[in-house]
Amino acid sequence: MIVSVSTASVSGTIAAPPSKSAMQRAVACALLSEGRSEIINPSLADDSLSALSMAECLGADIKKLSDRFIIQGGFNPLCNKVFCGESGLGARLFSVIAALSNDWIEITGEGSLTGRPFNMLNKTLTQLGVEVITTNGSLPLKVKGPMKAGRVIVDGSLSSQFLTGLLIALPILENNSRLFVRNLKSKPYIDLTIEILNHFGIKIDNEEYTIFNIPGSQSFKPGVFTVEGDWSGAAFLLVMGAIAGELRIRNISYLSTQPDTAIIEIIKETGAIVEIAENDITVRNNELRSFEIDISDCPDLAPPLAVLASFCKGKSVIYGTERLKIKESNRGEALEKEFTKLGVKITNYNDRIEIVGPSKIRGGNVDSHGDHRIAMALTILSLASDSGVVITGAESVNKSYPSFYDDLIQLGIKIKKT
């Protein structure tokens, strides 16, 4: 899909999309619950739909109602091949759950996910008695259990997603497990995992994110789970308010354990006006100044922060960007290439991105690189262009925020889809 975005100021109220991160974790927990669970305010992003499909293959009975999904849980694999789409979390999370089975199960994916690393899964699962076959360290991969409880070392330097899979799967095993985690990135996502596990009746003991004690013989308790607003998607909306007018975001809580809540403090630091209420946040444009931030624990903020920095006076520096090269695109390179086309002074280094602003945004043609967060960043940046911007590959937003363009149109922004 190609979209054309016209210059616009913004004013109004919009709801944050449901969190695909919370949704996928809840689906996994509902799968392992013996009974009926309800997921309210569900995410319909591609990654979330992939999680539902994987859960069905592994034994869940799922029905969609107008505002929720009903999931009858019970791990009982019905397929020997599970497709995870382009979801990194889904692939790593459900690979671990699949390893509970006595039979071989293949995990396949598509797009950029097939080139992303899965070596850490091989090294750890074999310590738990699982047979693992990967394709040169990537997808497709096969696992064969049954997984056994035990003491294992987990490398968390590339992603916390595999650790999330272990935390969800290990509690139902008969014996206790102990995980020794090294170099863990994105710690707040582990907080989110443990919070959702607690909701489903599972207890985990976390010792400073380096040791996780997991009692065995636990049972997931089915129930009702409401998906909270997604801070990764809302970050683009908040930045839009900061650079282009005034925007109130509903269905978002500053008390969330999602790591991308960090965007609020940076927006405040730039000088934009921020008002925080119980379940909504309002951001208003103001004269903006440069900032510095380390995003090691919240790498998904790189694209919206790059937009914000483009309108700040002075040099902004975004540190901790090493892992951007293994996202849906090489995000650091993609941001530099496409933002430069529109007049932004941006330089991508291995460990940081530097942007000197404020920039005069010019019109032109840009590409999303098949990356949902690059597409959204380019869209928000386009609102300040002198003659409008055409974005190729804009359908990539469906991965995390399928209603993104419709939501902007409701705010009065002129967007043409072709």
Image: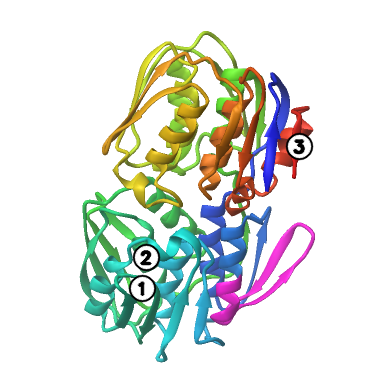
| Whether residue 3 is situated above or below residue 227 in the rendered picture | above
| Whether residue 372 is situated above or below residue 97 in the rendered picture | above
Give the residue at x 72% y 72%: 63
Q: Are marks 2 and 1 in contact (CB under 8 Å)?
A: yes
How many C-alpha atoms fall within 10 Å of the one at disc 1: few (<14), some, or many (≥20)? many
Q: Which residues are magenta?
A: 53-73
Q: Position of residue 296 (x, y in %)?
A: 32, 40
Task: Locate residue 284 relative to residue 149 in the image: left or right.
Answer: right
User: Mark 3 is on which residue type?
Assistant: Lys
Residue at disc 2, secondary structure: helix
Sooner in the amino-acid sequence: mark 2 or mark 3: 2
Q: Which residue is mark 2?
A: 167
Task: Locate residue 12 relative to residue 142 in the image: left or right.
Answer: right
Question: What mark, if any, has residue 170 been given in the picture?
Answer: 1
Camera-nearest label, 2 or 3: 3
Whether residue 203 can be seen here: no
Q: Position of residue 304 (x, y in %)?
A: 50, 32
Q: CA distance from mark 2 to mark 3?
A: 44 Å
Q: CA distance from mark 2 to mark 1?
A: 6 Å
Q: Which residue is mark 3?
A: 416
| Number of numbered discs visible in the structure rendering | 3
**Res 210 → quadrant:** bottom left
Residue at disc 1, secondary structure: helix
Q: Position of residue 123 (x, y in %)?
A: 23, 72
